[in-house]
Image (cartoon, rainbow, N blue to C red):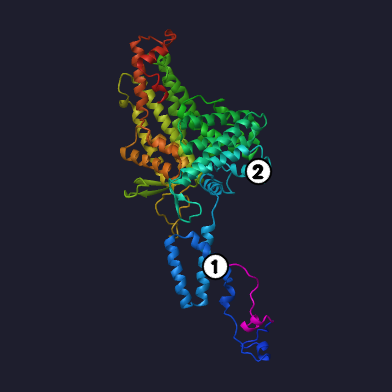
Amino acid sequence: MVYLGRPSKGCQMCRTRRIKCDETKPTCNQCAKARRQCPGYRDEFDLLLRNENQAAARRALKANTAAASSSSSSSSKKATASNKNAQPHPRQQALQLSRSQTAALTNSLSIPVEDLATCHFLSNFVLVPPQEQHSARGYNHFLLPLLQQYSNGTNRKEITHLQHAFNACALASLGERYGVPSPGRGHGRLTTGKEKETLLRKGAEEYTLALMATNAALRDPVRCKEDGTLAAVLLLGMFENITARQDTGSAWGSHVEGAVQLVKARGKKQLKSKLGVQLFVVVRSQLIIHNFITATPLPMGVSWWLNEDANSDPTANACERLNLLTAELRSEAYGFFSSPLSFSSSPASIAAVEEFLARARALDAEAVEWFATLPRSWQIESIPYSSSGNENIFPGVVHVYPDMWTAAIFNLARATRMVLMSIIVRCAAFLVRPGDYRTTAEYAFAARTASSVVSEVIASVPYHLGHLPPRKDKRGNPIENSLNGRGLGGYFLTWPLACVVTHDHVTDAQREYVRGRLRYIGDEHGIKYARVLFGVNLRLPSMLIFKDGKLAAAAAASKIPGAHSVGGSAGAVMRAAGLTSRLRSV
């Protein structure tokens, strides 16, 4: 309905004569003086829901007819004809017209795809911490003030690259997601049709524009240190994980390495602002994962990344310290085991491996202490779950966390422990070769610890993906699961599940469940990198130990007495073992 001005409460006769009615009831004095029969007054309902004129009614019905299908159009015409003959009550007429106008309005509204993508990304991939909590307990929330600057027109030139990068991620996340609502179609679903192709094409175009604009900003000595430039680089890396194009790992890694160089150039000054600290913490977390994957040395060392000005949350910072130290240890151990010169019986090689083993055990002991001394605000609620009929929940225990940010920190710590267990087993295999490392105490300890950690990661999956079993509060009222469908939960879960699905100490049922969850994240949450991990067929650390055995056999065949007497024969030994190309993939 439309507003046609203040409705008149006069009688029908006075309104027809266009004179002022004194509204005397039951008969007005104007009709009495004119010796006319007063027809009375309109119903209160008619005053609230007044009909439009016939032209406006025809326009509304025409719009509704154009938006409806041909079958529904013909049926509505028949219904209209029958209604005219039946002369329904005015209230029914008003209700029918209101419905027709609402339908016409709903069908005529078409939300721009860019706006829909923006809302989808902000609601799924931006975690804003509550006001009473520290600003570090969020993710991607630095985008809100930066994009606000763009919308207000301030520093527009400096953050154009950020806007393009944001648009690329928003369009790609909406386009890659299976079964998301379609613009202007109510409850319609967007699958693999023309709309999805349009979203992905526009996302790729925005990504190209973002690359060009970011490269231009990086060449500027001032703009390269802006918050918007670092945020744009982080979003470019996120785009690679969402779309999972060819060489996704190296593309994402190159963006992480670029972000690290920007953080280095920005120096300590960046930690003087909240935005600077938020960006620093995100880069540090992504650097840890990147170094776990590539086993490359930490740039600037561990101490540089443990800057006191970035210690916003003591508990999270203690976990980040363990993650960084483990990444450093993995880099050193991987470099040692990658060289055939290390596979000799020299005292130096044995001492180096024993040192790696001791450091790994010490770091794991610190991780156990970290879990045991968590503050009360970090405590987990455990819910027993024994049913096997729900593919979203693995039978056993389901964990409920204080918030998504805390859950992500927990799983990063668990992934770190799995990396430490791989290092321990690999070192044990080196020290007992040619014996069976599976008979050692180190292997038994690592197998027991890894199995426990794997179960804990799996118990966190329903919380991340919004599949918690029905719960009730202390009063017996159902607890609503507010995290259902959030893409950020799947994004956080991808790395821990990758560690689980490739680890040796995982049962077949657990591995099948994790692979199913990776596929779900790729299809339902639109994070296609999870789909890539779904197809990975690695077993660690057994495949690494097998590779070490090949290198040791090649070293023995080449009669290498020790590391110092070999000279430049390392490449020849690796070629003899046939491992030159495979080293890059394991």
Q: Of the numbered discs in the image, which one, if any, rests on residue 58?
A: 1
Q: Nearer the viewer, residue 503 or 530?
A: 530
Is there CB contact under 8 Å for labels 2 and 1? no
Quarter occupied by the N terminus: bottom right
Under mark 1, the amino acid is Arg
Q: Nearer the viewer, residue 19 or 414?
A: 19
Residue 6, percent from left and from top: 65, 73
Q: The magenta stretch spans which residues?
A: 1-19
Residue 175, percent from left and from top: 48, 44
Instruction: Locate residue 524: give its quadrant.
Output: top left
Under mark 2, the amino acid is Gln
Q: Is residue 310 above or below residue 477?
A: above
Residue 574, percent from left and from top: 39, 15
Q: Which residue is mark 2?
A: 149
Sort mark 2 into few (<14), some (14-19) or many (20+) by Cα contacts within 10 Å.
Answer: some
Q: Is residue 12 magenta?
A: yes
Q: Is residue 79 magenta?
A: no
Instruction: Locate residue 271: give its quadrant.
Output: top right
Sort mark 1 into few (<14), some (14-19) or many (20+) by Cα contacts within 10 Å.
Answer: few
Quarter occupied by the C terminus: top left
Q: Main secondary structure of the magenta part?
A: loop
Q: Is residue 567 above or below residue 389?
A: above
Judged left or right of residue 111, residue 149 is: right
Q: Is residue 44 above or below residue 285?
A: below
User: Which badge, 2 or 1, is on the more N-terminal residue?
Assistant: 1
How far is the residue under mark 2 from the one under mark 1? 45 Å
